Image (cartoon, rainbow, N blue to C red):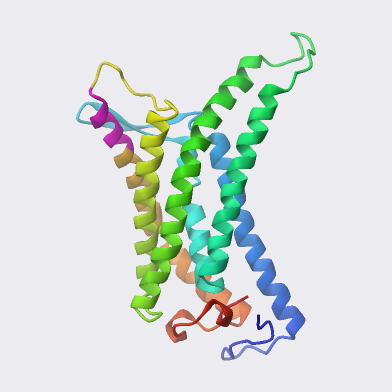
Amino acid sequence: MLPSQQYEHSGLEALPEAELYRRRETVFLVLSGIFLGTLAMLNLLGITRFLDLGFEIAGNPVMIAVGVLPYPITFLCTDLISELYGQDRASRVVWVGLLLNIWVMFIMWAGGALPGVDLGADREPPVHLFTELQSATQAAVLASMIAYLLAQLVDVHVFHFWKRLTKGKHLWLRNNGSTLASQLVDTLAVVFVTHYLAGGLPVDGDKPLVPQLLVFVLAGYSFKLVVALLDTPFFYLGTRWLCRYLRVPPPEESELETNAERVD
């Protein structure tokens, strides 16, 4: 752990050790907080509603779950953590996210298992609101836990694979390459787990099943693909600004380093 080491950026003054440590830990907490908060939100939203994209493929309507909307930001956060703090810290955040999934499932289970208070018909919302949310959340979280762990670990490992292969160059390649590979894993896992283990997808029983599931995969992955490509400029800008703010080498000047040589 080397909190006093800093890269000499042109035109930037050196920072005291305490300030350098404060900045690095604060940025890590902010990125981790956005990641974990977004993860909790998408698990609660999950499959409570599906958005109709307004067109069909092979006679099947194309739709995405509302929980998919905030999901791509989680990969931007882990990519920034991977770039600035190394693979070890990024992996630890992923494991904390898994614990968060388990915690959400436990709270939803406890909310249904413990006795409720009867406040009267005129004051208490219908019980079915909670039970429907609980059912949808459990289905979404079950799928999310499996898909999340696979996808986020793939994202972190592929990111560092491309970083080693390109010797720290081509920032766009490791950002998009890791995200697109992990998003494909995530989409496949979410769709098939949600259907086969949780029965949470709105499929038409009168139509062939596999084409409908493939449309869900195509819709979800296409959305994530577009967002991943759109977030590349933000990843570049965020990385370069944060490298200066945290006094670490910019990506094009960094060499293959161990985690201890990055922000720790």
Residue at 47% x, 48% y is 148
User: In which quadrant will I find the C terminus?
Assistant: bottom right
Q: Nearer the viewer, residue 140 or 246?
A: 140
Q: Position of residue 261 (x, y in %)?
A: 56, 82
Q: Is residue 42 above or below residue 224?
A: above
Counting the numbered discs, the total is: 0
Magenta stretch, overall SS: helix
Where is residue 252? Give x, y as percent: 43, 83
Q: Nearer the viewer, residue 179 or 49?
A: 179
Q: Residue at x 68, y 82 (%)?
A: 3
Question: Is 187 situated left or right of 206 in this image?
Answer: right
Give the camera-side residue of 44 and 226.
44
Q: Position of residue 256 (x, y in %)?
A: 44, 83
The quadrant in which the N terminus is found is: bottom right
Q: Residue furthest left?
A: 58
Residue 40 in view: no
Q: Decide whether residue 34 is among the magenta residues.
A: no
- Tell me what residue is drawn at x 53 percent, y 60 percent: 77
Q: Indicate left or right for 201 with 138 as reference.
A: left
Q: Residue furthest top?
A: 121
Instruction: Please state the horizontal and vertical placement of residue 212, each as a whole percent of the image.
Output: 28, 29
Q: Residue at x 40, y 74 (%)?
A: 163
What segment is highlighted magenta in the picture? Answer: 208-216
Q: Nearer the viewer, residue 74 or 260?
A: 260
| Residue 162 is at least partly visible in this image | yes
Using the image, determine if residue 148 lies above or below residue 261. above
Classify 219 as above or below 200. Answer: below
Image check: 1 left or right of 162? right
